[in-house]
């Protein structure tokens, strides 16, 4: 077990105190991070006391320490899971050789790109969510939002640690770049398209944490397999935090469903009663699931083949596969056919994006099944469905083609006419926006969502998760 | 990558080079007052040959044929244009360069010809500024890799959007194991004059360089934030248009299709024919000189328009040269013949030169002749000029004989022939070196060039031989055998060695950026293309996009 040096200005379990060069680099970066947090972090709550979980060590007991803290005082630190002795490369052309403790020169720029792309999503999501505190449905939810936000901040730290430690002056420059880009700013946008759309209501926030954070989970799972050991250990630790973000998403959607079902028992028109109807929920699901699919990249990808072959990025849970070299064999990827989706076989390595994406879809389905179980148990005849991977795509073989959610290819005119059967309409969005009002009284909750079945760390729902500064 | 099968296995339909804007599939040519915009927007599923998709604005020969056509038409058909903006019609993607699966699945000969053609087209873009006075502005609005950046380099000025993502790069060496062979390496140091140590860094950095650093290093002229992009681009284009030196007298002139009879083995245009003798591996280009009625005053010449002999004949010559290059790879010897009145050529030349002094139409015709003759210089076939009675190797058509590797003139006292120079031989039609072909011919004996220019009247075969204007002047008894043996001997020699030998002998004199592109850059590229490290079974180009990774033979050569 490694312990954290609490006396350093930057909490860590990477012996930062013995590496003066790295420490100086990080100490220089830290004030810039804080000023980014103050500019772009949650707006209006920086002085409040939040009941947050802070990682104080990397083992099972230590990584979840709960206490009140002001967000700017949150101790963002650097934690890697403990090294695995004699760890070997688990896949690709160098299968079975010792993992790398330093970056191989020939893979330097690609590895840097992978880390920067992952790292960029962390501050991006904080920026996307910065106004949500003002319209939170309860203090419990507000606290969860901030928990997610500070941990995304820590994930940024984790990636910056790698950039500073292993990528020299280029890495330092990229670390600055992570603080300079801004979600939605046309002049310095975040790298991935989906991270430039604001998240302006809580239904979107739950969908985002369910579907988009789950993309994060799968990217991290694949990077946790990386032959570059520091990246692998960093990502493994991040996964423990990511699980909570998806929990916020899954239970959030579940509570919206529960409330809709409760209201349906009171009357037919959920909207009249101030709830979120299930067809609208399906349209939001359609949007967020497909936007998240785009994050996996093109279906047939030479980069994916390179990442796998070179050992930079594996498959989620690589150990479960038999063939870790993956030079033989093909994988069926969805592709547009004459009037719907067909499949096409491509070499396994080139299909790695879809291999990962399919595992993601399966994982996504599990929560959807639980949502549907809840709907059924409420005696309501409605089923939420994940749309076809051909629907509403901006990237890949089906990009910009007029597929409907079932995977049928419509003509463009029909798609345009029926678009808001499939995706949130401006009216849907206006309706959801009309429901969003901040609720800050302990124990109170907005009308459109049910309270959680239990609170945080055995505390009741009524607990004062956020102590608001006198306003 | 779709498939890796060669698309040159079955006898393909011949590639044709004539097109017009109504048939473009990959470029949109639009006009806004004095600003023309050429936007690349490749149609993924419309490659020239099946077997690859043109994703991310990657180009193949079909894309470049349209580009070359558009440049030509801007010169002739759009006198109002005073600035050309080259950009992309796709969001956040400027151009990903030449299509790699296309290159990977092409024969060596096709790759070489493809690169040569694209190099010629880039030079045409530069010539648009130099000879037509139309400044070019490249608006790099997204990813700009490899051939994409080389396209940008061929423009006078490069703007790059600064959105944290758009980068310029030359990833060929680190990623594909080949060179940026469309002038990239040459223009980076010789045109943009980037420090060579930085050029070294840039050319091995697969991800390229973004934003401010791209500007600092001189890779682009200016970076512009996305929010101010449209406005800044419009202002830059307007500023360049305001300083343009374009002269457009006598324009527009629409370029109609040539419409000759085209068969694989024989093309018969109005003034130019191409005959293929596949069995002997010999092709013959016959060029008909102007008629006695060819107009000689500027107004009448303009009246004749696209039917003006000089314009039409050289467009036709261009067409048959390309047909020969791409559709008849095994032809070893190209015979150049002419027929017509020497005096008529000289009259037409003098008239054209006089009219060209005023710019506009005639100057564009002259520019076209110059480019086509350079295309002939660059054609990797052994060229013999066959000068016979009734031929008209005079002035602009004598350039064919000067471009040839050697020339044979029939010395038959019963049927005298005539060779003559015109003012067009004095530097109006320079080679890539900047020298006229006559000065290149007499590179070591400038006095002979001077006395040839001072000569009044024509030369017969024997006189031309004495003056050094032809290589051989066999008499009528020897002629048939001499010529036949010369051809048979020539086609028996290794085609690779001949290409290399000719490329070394054709351009005596100074080096220019253009000669370095075709000489140094292309030659190294063509060598690398044949090496296992790029195109072998485990080569980087072969394996790009495939699941396997390349393996190299580490011996440096
Ligand atoms: Fe994260
Ligand atoms: Fe997350």
Image (tube, rainbow, N blue to C red):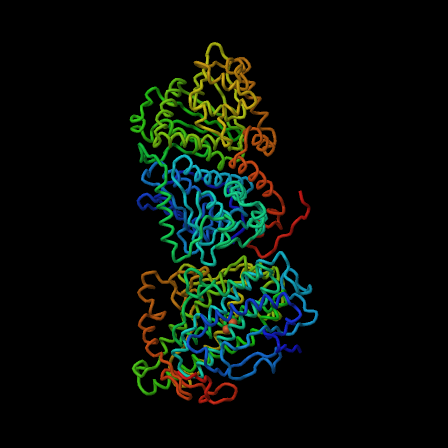
Q: Quadrant of residue A88?
A: bottom right
Q: Is residue B184 left or right of residue A409?
A: right
Asked where in the image residue A309 lies, by quadrant, the reply is bottom right
Q: Position of residue A256 (x, y in %)?
A: 40, 81
Q: Is residue B341 above or below residue A133?
A: above
Q: Residue furthest right?
A: A86
Q: Is A383 in front, or is A76?
A: A76
Q: Quadrant of the N terminus of chain A?
A: bottom right
Residue B412 percent location from the top left of the image: 49, 12
Pick whichever, B279 or A465, lies toward us: A465
Residue B29 can be seen in this image:
no
Relative height, residue A292 to residue B252 (above, below): below
Q: Which x, y percent locates residue A433?
A: 34, 75
Which residue corresponds to the image point at 32% horizontal and 21% vertical from the top-left?
A: B293
Residue B481, horizontal then vertical, whole percent:
56, 18
Is any part of residue B422 visible from this angle?
yes
Number of numbered discs: 0
Looking at this view, is A178 or B500 the one in front? A178
- Note whether A25 is above or below B331 in the view shown: below
Question: Which quadrant is the C terminus of chain A positioned in?
Answer: bottom left
């Amino acid at each position: 077990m490694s312990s954290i040096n609490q006396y350093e200005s930057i909490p860590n379990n990477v012996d930062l105190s013995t590496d003066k060069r790295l420490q100086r680099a990080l100490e220089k970066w830290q004030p810039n991070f804080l000023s980014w947090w103050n500019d772009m972090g949650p707006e209006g709550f920086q002085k409040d006391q939040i009941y947050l979980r802070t990682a104080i060590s990397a083992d099972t007991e230590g990584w979840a320490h709960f206490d009140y803290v002001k967000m700017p005082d949150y101790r963002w630190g650097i934690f890697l899971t403990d090294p695995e002795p004699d760890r070997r490369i688990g896949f690709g052309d160098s299968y079975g050789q010792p993992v790398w403790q330093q970056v191989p020169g020939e893979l330097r720029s690609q590895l840097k790109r992978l880390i920067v792309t992952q790292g960029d999503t962390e501050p991006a999501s904080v920026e996307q969510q910065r106004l949500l505190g003002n319209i939170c449905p309860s203090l419990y939810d507000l606290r969860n939002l901030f928990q997610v936000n500070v941990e995304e901040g820590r994930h940024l730290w984790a990636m910056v640690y790698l950039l500073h430690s292993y990528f020299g002056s280029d890495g330092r420059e990229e670390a600055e770049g992570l603080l300079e880009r801004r979600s939605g700013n046309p002049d310095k946008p975040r790298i991935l398209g989906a991270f430039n759309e604001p998240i302006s209501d809580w239904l979107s926030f739950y969908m985002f944490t369910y579907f988009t954070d789950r993309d994060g989970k799968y990217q991290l799972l694949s990077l946790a397999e990386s032959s570059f050991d520091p990246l692998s250990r960093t990502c493994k630790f991040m996964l423990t935090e990511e699980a909570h973000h998806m929990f916020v998403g899954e239970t959030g959607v579940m509570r919206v469903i529960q409330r809709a079902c409760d209201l349906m028992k009171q009357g037919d028109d959920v909207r009249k009663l101030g709830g979120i109807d299930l067809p609208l929920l399906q349209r939001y699901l359609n949007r967020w699931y497909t936007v998240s699919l785009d994050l996996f990249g093109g279906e047939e990808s030479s980069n994916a083949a390179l990442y796998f072959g070179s050992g930079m990025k594996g498959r989620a849970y690589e150990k479960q596969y038999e063939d870790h070299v993956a030079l033989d064999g093909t994988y069926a990827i969805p592709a547009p056919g004459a009037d719907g989706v067909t499949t096409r076989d491509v070499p396994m390595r080139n299909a790695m994006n879809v291999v990962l994406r399919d595992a993601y879809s399966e994982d996504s389905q599990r929560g959807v099944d639980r949502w549907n179980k809840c709907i059924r148990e409420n005696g309501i005849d409605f089923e939420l469905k994940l749309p076809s991977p051909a629907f509403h795509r901006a990237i890949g073989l089906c990009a910009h083609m007029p597929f409907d959610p079932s995977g049928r290819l419509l003509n463009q005119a029909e798609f345009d006419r029926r678009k808001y059967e499939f995706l949130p309409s401006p009216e849907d969005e206006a309706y959801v926006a009309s429901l969003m009002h901040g609720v800050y009284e302990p124990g109170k909750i907005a009308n459109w969502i049910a309270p959680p079945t239990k609170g945080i760390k055995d505390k009741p729902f009524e607990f004062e998760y956020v102590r608001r500064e006198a306003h | 990558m779709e498939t890796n099968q060669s698309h040159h296995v079955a006898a393909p339909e011949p590639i044709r080079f004539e097109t017009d804007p109504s048939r473009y599939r990959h470029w949109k040519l639009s006009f806004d007052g004095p600003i023309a915009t050429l936007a690349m927007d490749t149609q993924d599923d419309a490659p020239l040959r099946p077997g690859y998709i043109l994703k991310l604005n990657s180009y193949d020969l079909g894309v470049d044929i349209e580009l070359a056509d558009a440049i030509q038409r801007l010169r002739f058909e759009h006198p109002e244009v005073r600035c050309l903006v080259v950009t992309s019609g796709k969001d956040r993607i400027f151009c990903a360069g030449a299509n790699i699966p296309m290159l990977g699945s092409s024969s060596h000969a096709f790759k070489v010809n493809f690169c040569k053609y694209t190099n010629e087209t880039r030079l045409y873009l530069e010539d648009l500024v130099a000879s037509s006075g139309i400044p070019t502005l490249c608006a790099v609005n997204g990813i700009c890799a490899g051939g994409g950046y080389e396209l940008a380099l061929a423009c006078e000025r490069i703007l790059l959007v600064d959105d944290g993502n758009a980068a310029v790069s030359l990833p060929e060496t680190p990623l594909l194991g080949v060179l940026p062979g469309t002038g990239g390496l040459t223009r980076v140091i010789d045109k943009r004059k980037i420090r060579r140590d930085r050029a070294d860094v840039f050319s091995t950095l697969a991800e390229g360089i973004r934003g401010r650093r791209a500007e600092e290093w001189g890779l682009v002229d200016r970076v512009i934030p996305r929010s101010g992009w449209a406005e800044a681009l419009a202002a830059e284009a307007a500023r360049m248009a305001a300083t343009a030196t374009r002269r457009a007298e006598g324009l527009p002139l629409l370029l109609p299709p040539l419409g000759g009879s085209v068969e694989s083995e024989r093309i018969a245009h109005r003034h130019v024919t191409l005959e293929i003798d596949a069995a002997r591996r010999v092709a013959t280009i016959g060029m008909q000189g102007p008629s006695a009625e060819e107009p000689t005053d500027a107004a009448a010449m303009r009246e004749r328009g696209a039917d003006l002999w000089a314009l039409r004949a050289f467009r036709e010559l261009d067409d048959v040269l390309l047909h020969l290059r791409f559709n008849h790879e095994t032809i070893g010897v190209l015979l150049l013949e002419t027929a017509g009145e020497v005096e008529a050529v000289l009259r037409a030349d003098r008239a054209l030169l006089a009219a060209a002094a005023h710019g506009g139409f005639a100057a564009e015709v002259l520019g076209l002749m110059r480019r086509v003759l350079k295309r002939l210089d660059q054609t990797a076939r052994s060229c013999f000029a066959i000068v016979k009675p009734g031929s008209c190797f005079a002035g602009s058509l004598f350039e064919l004989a000067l471009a040839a590797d050697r020339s044979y003139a029939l010395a038959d006292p019963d049927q005298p022939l005539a060779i003559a120079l015109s003012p067009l031989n004095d530097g109006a039609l320079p080679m890539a070196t900047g020298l006229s072909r006559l000065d290149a011919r007499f590179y070591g004996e400038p006095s002979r060039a001077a006395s040839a220019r001072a000569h009044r009247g024509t030369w017969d075969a024997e006189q031309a031989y004495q003056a050094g204007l032809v290589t051989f002047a066999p008499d009528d008894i020897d002629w048939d055998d001499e010529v036949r043996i010369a051809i048979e001997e020539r086609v028996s020699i290794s085609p690779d060695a001949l290409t290399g030998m000719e490329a070394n002998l054709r351009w005596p004199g100074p080096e220019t950026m253009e000669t370095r592109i075709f000489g140094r850059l292309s030659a190294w590229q063509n060598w690398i293309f044949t090496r296992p490290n790029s195109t072998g079974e485990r080569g980087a180009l072969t394996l790009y996009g495939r699941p396997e990774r390349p393996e190299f033979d580490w011996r440096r050569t």
